[in-house]
């Protein structure tokens, strides 16, 4: 009788053993569902997941479900080489007979429309609106439609993997034994009967080196254009350079202090013309400052008492939005002028539809809920208000 492999073997897992564990989890949990959906972001882990599943099905290593849908969340903020690789993978999947779909955020929730049209400040680690608005909402909308179409709950396959981040590892550790799932045999999450899908992470146990090895194998042996993904993250076949274990794939991600992926890209001659994109992240950090935003003053609760957090910073004011819009379009033009000269792919930070919507929202003085643009600017000196109604006026208010 064959012995079941475990993540906690004394021997260090190799890629073939990791694939065996993935096959076990897909056979076991996959057999419980007629319909599968693969969530594909274009990053290294989800690219490894979708190409692995496609290959295993075609080889007959795992049973093919009644339907398999691949959903690519196009945030319109992906690094150009990663986006190009994702489009190539989708094209190859369609060529092999798989249903591969692209979903985008609704117009008003796209990055620059939401930020410059409505005035919402750039994402931060304490206000991370980008993931739900750009990715999750569009995926959930498509999943709901699929649930209605299929008439039953399906299995959603993701590229979640141990080692991506400490916070994610902690969530996995807490829930890894839930519903009888075993560590090393895929992270399975069973939801309520009314939910859209249950979730399986079939490469949960893969080490990062397994991901790189598989991506190179998928390109050289299976015909998927995954080599460019490895190059973006710093994995070179020839020199053995240690790849970075970065998770960001967004242009100028404002959540990181150092944009390692973009720096690696522009060191490659064919992508050097993207260098002006390095101006975006400092711009996002700059416009978080008070002078670009409005501030609430004299804010009261529903019961009439003074709100505890006075003078809180809020949205970007109209002048700042117009200034930022001009700078972003200038960066886009800088890249595309060189792209046209060198016959390289052009970029689209803000397309015509988005630009028209941004201008429309600015023209109608659009702000987030409970803001109207009459609030003082964030760098305005204001008197201090106390809960008993007392006011401490400004000293030297003539300055």
Image (cartoon, grey):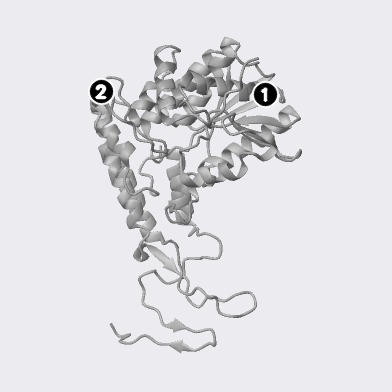
In the picture, measured across the screen, residue 356 lies left or right of residue 190, that is left
Residue 212: x percent and y percent? 40, 25
Screen quadrant of the C terminus: bottom left
Which numbered tag is attached to residue 212?
Answer: none
| Number of residues whose C-alpha sits closer than 10 Å to that of mark 2, classed few (under 14), some (14–19) or many (20 or more) | few
Judge left or right: residue 348 versus residue 369: left
Marks 2 and 1, the one that precedes in the sequence: 1
Q: Quadrant of residue 200?
A: top right
Residue under the image location 36 percent in, 77 percent down: 381
Location of residue 1 with respect to 358 vertically, above or below: above
Q: 342 or 19: which is nearer to us?
A: 19
- Local crowd size for mark 1, using a 10 Å CA cut-off: few (<14), some (14–19), many (≥20): few
> Distance between the Cα atoms at labels 2 and 1?
39 Å
Q: Residue at x 50, y 58 (%)?
A: 366
Question: What residue appears at the point 28 percent right and 46 percent down from the top-left corner?
Answer: 279
Q: Is residue 357 visible to the viewer in this orientation of the structure? A: no
- Residue at horizontal 53%, vertical 75%? 308
Residue 219's spot in the image, x, y percent?
41, 16
Residue that numbered label 2 is attached to? 239
* Front one among 246 and 38: 246
Location of the N terminus (image quadrant): top right
Under tag 2, what secondary structure? Answer: loop
Horizontal and vertical percent position of residue 218: 44, 17
Q: Secondary structure at mark 1?
A: helix
Circles 2 and 1, Cβ within 8 Å, touching? The answer is no
Q: Is residue 19 visible?
A: yes
Front-most of 28 and 220? 28
On screen, 16 above or below 243?
above
Q: Quadrant of residue 338?
A: top left
Question: Looking at the picture, how far across and down is residue 314, in whole percent?
Answer: 46, 64
Residue where numbered disc 1 is placed: 28
């Amino acid at each position: 009788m064959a012995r079941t492999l475990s993540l906690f073997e004394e021997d260090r897992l190799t890629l073939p053993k990791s694939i065996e564990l993935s096959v076990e989890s897909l056979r076991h949990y996959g057999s419980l569902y007629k319909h599968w959906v693969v969530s594909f972001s274009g990053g290294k882990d989800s690219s490894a997941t979708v190409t692995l599943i496609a290959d295993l099905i075609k080889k007959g290593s795992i049973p093919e479900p009644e339907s398999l849908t691949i959903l690519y969340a196009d945030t319109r903020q992906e690094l150009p080489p990663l986006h190009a690789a994702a489009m190539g993978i989708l094209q190859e999947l369609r060529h092999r007979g798989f249903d591969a779909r692209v979903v985008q955020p609704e117009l008003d929730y796209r990055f620059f429309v939401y930020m410059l049209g409505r005035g919402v400040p750039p994402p931060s680690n304490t206000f991370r609106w980008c993931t739900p608005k750009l990715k999750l909402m569009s995926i959930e909308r498509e999943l709901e439609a699929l649930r209605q179409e299929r008439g039953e709950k399906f299995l959603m396959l993701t590229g979640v993997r141990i080692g991506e981040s400490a916070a994610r590892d902690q969530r996995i550790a807490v829930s890894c034994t839930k519903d009888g799932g075993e560590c090393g045999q895929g992270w399975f999450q069973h939801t309520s009967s009314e939910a859209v899908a249950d979730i399986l992470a079939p490469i949960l146990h893969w080490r990062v080196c397994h991901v790189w090895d598989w991506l190179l194998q998928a390109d050289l042996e299976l015909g998927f254009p995954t080599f460019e993904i490895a190059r973006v993250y710093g994995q070179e076949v020839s020199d053995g350079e240690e790849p970075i274990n970065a998770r960001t794939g967004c242009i100028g991600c404002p959540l990181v202090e150092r944009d390692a992926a973009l720096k690696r890209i522009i060191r490659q001659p064919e992508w050097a013309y993207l260098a002006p994109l390095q101006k975006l992240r400092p711009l996002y950090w700059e416009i978080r400052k008070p002078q670009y935003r409005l501030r609430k003053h004299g804010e009261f609760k529903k019961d009439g008492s003074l709100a505890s957090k006075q003078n809180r910073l809020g949205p970007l004011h109209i002048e700042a939005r117009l200034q930022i819009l001009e700078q972003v379009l200038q960066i886009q033009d800088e890249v595309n002028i060189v792209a046209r000269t060198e016959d390289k792919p052009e970029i689209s930070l803000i397309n015509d539809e988005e630009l028209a919507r941004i201008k429309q929202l600015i023209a109608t003085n659009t702000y987030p809920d409970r803001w109207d643009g009459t609030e003082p600017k964030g760098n305005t000196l204001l008197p201090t208000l106390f809960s008993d109604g007392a006011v401490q006026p400004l000293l030297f208010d003539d300055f």
